[in-house]
Amino acid sequence: METNKWLVFGILAIGVFMATLDGSIVNISLPAIANYFHVPLNGAVEWVTIAYLVTTASMLLTAGRLADMVGQKPVWLLGLVIFTFGSAICGAAPSLLFLVIARGFQGIGGALMMAISPAMLTSAFPPFERGRALGLNAINVALGVSVGPTVGGLITTSLSWRWIFYVNVPVGIIGLLATWFLLKERHAQRQGRFDPLGALTLGLGLAGITLALSFGQELGWFSPFVLVSLLGGLAALIALYFIEQRVAYPVIDFSLLRRRVFLSANISLILCFMSLFAVSFLMPFYLEQLHGFPTEVAGLLLTPLPITLACVAPLSGSLADRIGSRWLAATGLAISCLGLILLGQLNAHSSIWDIIWRLVVTGMGQAIFQSPNSSALMGDAPREQQGSASGFLATGRTMGQSISVALAGAVFTSLGGADAGLQLVMLRAHGALSLARAGALEQTFSHAFQSAFLVCALIAAIGVGTSLVRGKEERRRHQAGMAELSH
């Protein structure tokens, strides 16, 4: 990137915040959407979220490869165009089916933006500032996640659910104009041809697995839909391996996975999100069902984690530029492991302060891990493979989140936590909850809740080990970067 690094950061902030906000703003409006189209809340309306998630997950690696072939700016521009236009047609949807299809289309734009934004930051900033830039970018992500439910609730209440999509349009247009006129990219002759069969097979494989993980808990892991999706997705990924052996320019650059630091950082990233995304999934059940907090209060009580992430991530990123990522990433996941164990100790009598400080500890661990690990991952990839590396990063995050929800939900439900929570809500609503019955249900819920978090803590502990095997390459890159600047 030839543009001033902070200008690149500002332009990327628009797209990253918009895409992240869209992921959290829609869920709060699903009841209003279901009511508008006269469908059950737990039925077809779920596809408003699922369509976006599945499309995004299936496109990330392909988007990264495309950026390596045609350049980062064209892919970013295309992503902004599709996302902005997709937002407009989502807002104007005349039917639920139209809305679901439009969300899938919007997800293509989201994938193009999310897949290459780390690569664009890595290209714009020198090696010794890469961690700092990725840490500052974490603020945009944290803000999008934390303000989404509040903004979505306000927009839906004061205007209508359609405006949660329309709000993206003017912001997207600003991003488009800024990218077109201000963002410059050095044009280089790039070798390679696009692999359509590989891209299609990869998309089908990731889409099938994501669908299975999304619906496994609700429909049952042995239901025909889930089994067909999972087995079909796995079969497609197996076929992809053999397809990619026969083409000169594969859609997945497997050579990146032979790099020690890159592979270690990727595995650690997946384990991080497998363990920590369960917090966002399980805590609302704890706050609303076991504690009995209203939805808006529960949403407010969840904000300490993203706020901590936004405050600490830039500091850990800057520190990684000086000392490398190895020990920071391992320390971060170790603190997160402790935070997950502490969260699992919460019960119906825990105070608000007990909830907040445990979320802060967990968020601090995630922040200490995330920026250094992303910096290591992107820094170990050659310049001509930055798009592919960025696609791996985004795909690892998405798949880790999906597996986390499926795994934590399976443990929590199988031990009776989901059923106990529903009974507590229903009996409270009808004033029929005796002390003895409440105690039994709370104990069942707490046991399931704790078990789910202990499983997640174990995954985080494994991530500590995978973070430690990456070596000390970051220190060398920092010194090289400083020497380059001095010349």
Image: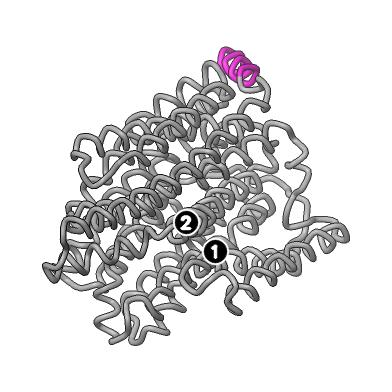
Category of crowding for the residue at label 2, using alpha-carbon neighbours closer than 10 angstroms: few (below 14), some (14–19), many (at least 20): many
Q: CA distance from mark 1 to mark 2?
A: 8 Å
| Residue ranking furthest to the right | 246
Q: Position of residue 268 (x, y in %)?
A: 59, 38
**Residue beneath the point at 29% across and 69% down:** 166
Q: Position of residue 240 (x, y in %)?
A: 77, 63
Q: Position of residue 445 (x, y in %)?
A: 34, 54
Specify the amino acid type for callout 1: Leu
Let me know if residue 168 appears in the view.
no
Let me know if residue 3 appears in the view.
yes
* Residue 477 in the figure: left or right of residue 414: right
Q: Which residue is mark 2?
A: 405
Q: Is residue 37 above or below residue 447?
A: below
Most common secondary structure along the magenta stretch: helix
Specify the amino acid type for callout 2: Val
- Relative to the observer, which residue lies in front, 144 or 177? 144
Indicate how the structure is coloured in the image.
Answer: one colour
Category of crowding for the residue at label 1, using alpha-carbon neighbours closer than 10 angstroms: few (below 14), some (14–19), many (at least 20): many
- Residue 396 part of the magenta-drawn span: no
Residue 139: name its quadrant: top left
- Relative to the observer, which residue lies in front, 146 or 339? 339
Work out which quarter of the rendered image holds the C terminus and state it.
top right
In magenta, the rendered stretch is 475-487
Mark with earlier residue (1, 2) = 1
**Residue beneath the point at 67% across and 66% down:** 205
- Residue 477 part of the magenta-drawn span: yes
Whether residues under marks 1 and 2 lie with C-beta atoms below 8 angstroms apart, the answer is yes
Q: Which residue is mark 1?
A: 213
Q: Could you tell me which secondary element the residue under label 2 belongs to?
A: helix
**Residue beneath the point at 13% across and 71% down:** 430
* Residue 316 in the figure: left or right of residue 213: left
